[in-house]
Image (cartoon, rainbow, N blue to C red):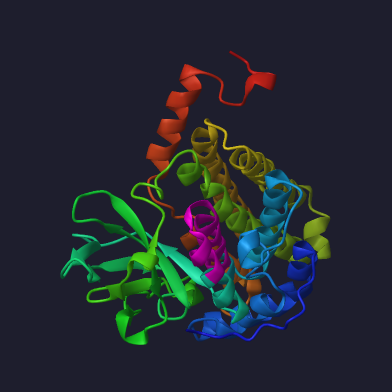
């Protein structure tokens, strides 16, 4: 298991912790972008700040918040700050937080104690569900021995994370969550991860074939991972990281504007459009996080529209930033170029048109905004 040796003292202010290390994460992100490997130093930085543990279950040593709304509001800010600093590390942190929530919702008392021990050592988790055909399955050698067969693709942190929660089909049918080791280098294949952006996320292939598992590695019950509204509404978390990237691009664009550009009303109009796009995305992500906090039954529809709002904001700000800054925005080594490359890939979430269409069906049936402000 990877040990990142976090410092024993963890502050009780996750947002302050994230802000304190943001510049360091940004500097490290530039290095890992130039020579992409698993961002070990960045993850150590997160662990030393306690950000790997704050959102863990209380039984695993996580921070106790006033309620779920406060927890998600603070988590949203932490994910935004991580995304502003380095979208690859933000992606890894978001996957880790996803795993922490799965432990809280579906883990046994012993599994949560084991999670606490892994966090004590500074370990990080991922959640890997995407898979090439025929997928990952649980194989029964006999009544007492089980193993996995198949591989996960787009497995962020493959070979670098201490553990991952993966989905696997049971022999009798149904999808199950399984906790596996994620740092076996010979199982990770990163040769296909040849991308312009998000390089250090190491989202490669991870072969699980032959990996022995025990009953204690099975998390929750069949179907737990796909339970709604948690499954779909949970998209707010990666949208928050993407939002951080958009905000970083906005900041870099402002800093890059020359006095001449600031004196030009056409350039100012483009910058104003960037501000509107970024802040509109912020409002939707914030609202979606609150829907998730209350397990709103219409949360999935809200999350599907939020995904589209954030994508549109990101695409608009990338285009406007390039027009405002000019050639320098595409120069290798420029932070504005890295952010745009990372965003261009991270925004490519699966099935955007289908997600928007499904949201439209809900809104055609009723105003999913809520009972306090319905229009129809």
The percent position of residue 280, horizontal first and vertical second, equals 67, 41
Quadrant location of residue 368?
top right
**Which residue is farthest left?**
141
Tally of marks = 0
In the figure, is residue 107 to the left or right of 86? left
Q: Is residue 321 visible?
A: no
The percent position of residue 347, horizontal first and vertical second, equals 49, 55
In the figure, is residue 249 to the left or right of 217? right
The percent position of residue 134, horizontal first and vertical second, equals 18, 60
Q: Is residue 271 above or below residue 280?
A: below
Q: Residue at x 54, y 35 (%)?
A: 299
- Residue 37 painted magenta: no
Secondary structure, magenta segment, majority class: helix
Q: Residue at x 79, y 53 (%)?
A: 264
Q: Residue at x 34, y 65 (%)?
A: 215
Q: Is residue 275 above or below residue 62?
A: above
Q: Residue at x 71, y 80 (%)?
A: 24
| Front residue of this view, candidates 76 and 341 | 76
- Residue 92 painted magenta: yes
Screen quadrant of the C terminus:
top right
The percent position of residue 77, horizontal first and vertical second, equals 71, 56
In the figure, is residue 7 to the left or right of 228? right
In the figure, is residue 278 to the left or right of 191? right
Magenta residues (range)? 91-113
Quadrant location of residue 190?
bottom left
């Amino acid at each position: 298991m990877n040990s990142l040796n976090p410092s024993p003292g963890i502050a009780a202010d996750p947002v302050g912790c994230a802000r304190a290390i943001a510049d360091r994460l940004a500097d490290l992100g530039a290095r890992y972008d130039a020579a992409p490997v698993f961002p070990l130093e960045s993850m150590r930085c997160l662990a030393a700040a306690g950000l790997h543990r704050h959102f863990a279950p209380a039984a695993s040593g996580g921070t106790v918040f006033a309620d779920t709304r406060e927890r998600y509001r603070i988590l949203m800010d932490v994910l935004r700050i991580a995304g502003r600093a380095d979208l690859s590390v933000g992606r890894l942190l978001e996957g880790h937080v996803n795993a922490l929530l799965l432990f809280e919702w579906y883990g046994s008392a012993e599994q949560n104690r084991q999670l606490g021990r892994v966090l004590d050592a500074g370990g990080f988790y991922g959640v890997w569900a995407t898979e090439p055909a025929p997928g990952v399955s649980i194989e029964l050698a006999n009544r007492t021995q089980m193993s996995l067969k198949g591989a996960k693709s787009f497995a962020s942190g493959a070979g670098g994370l201490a553990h991952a929660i993966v989905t696997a089909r049971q022999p009798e049918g149904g999808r199950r969550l399984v906790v596996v080791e994620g740092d076996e280098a010979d199982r990770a294949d990163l040769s296909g991860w040849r991308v312009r952006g998000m390089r250090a996320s190491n989202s490669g292939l991870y072969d699980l074939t032959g990996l022995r598992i025990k009953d204690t590695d099975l998390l929750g019950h069949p179907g737990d991972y796909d339970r709604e509204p948690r499954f779909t509404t949970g998209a707010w978390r990666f949208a928050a990281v993407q939002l951080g990237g958009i905000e970083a691009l906005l900041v870099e664009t402002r800093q890059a504007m020359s006095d001449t550009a600031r004196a030009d009303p056409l350039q100012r109009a483009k910058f104003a459009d960037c501000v509107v796009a970024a802040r509109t995305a912020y409002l939707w992500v914030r609202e979606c996080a609150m829907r998730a906090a209350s397990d709103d039954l219409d949360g999935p529809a809200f999350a599907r529209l939020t995904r589209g709002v954030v994508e549109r904001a990101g695409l608009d700000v990338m285009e406007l930033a390039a027009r405002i800054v000019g050639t320098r925005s595409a120069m290798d080594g420029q932070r504005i170029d890295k952010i745009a490359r990372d965003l261009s890939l991270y925004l490519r979430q699966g099935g955007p048109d289908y997600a928007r269409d499904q949201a439209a069906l809900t809104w055609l049936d009723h105003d999913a905004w809520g009972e306090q402000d319905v229009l129809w």
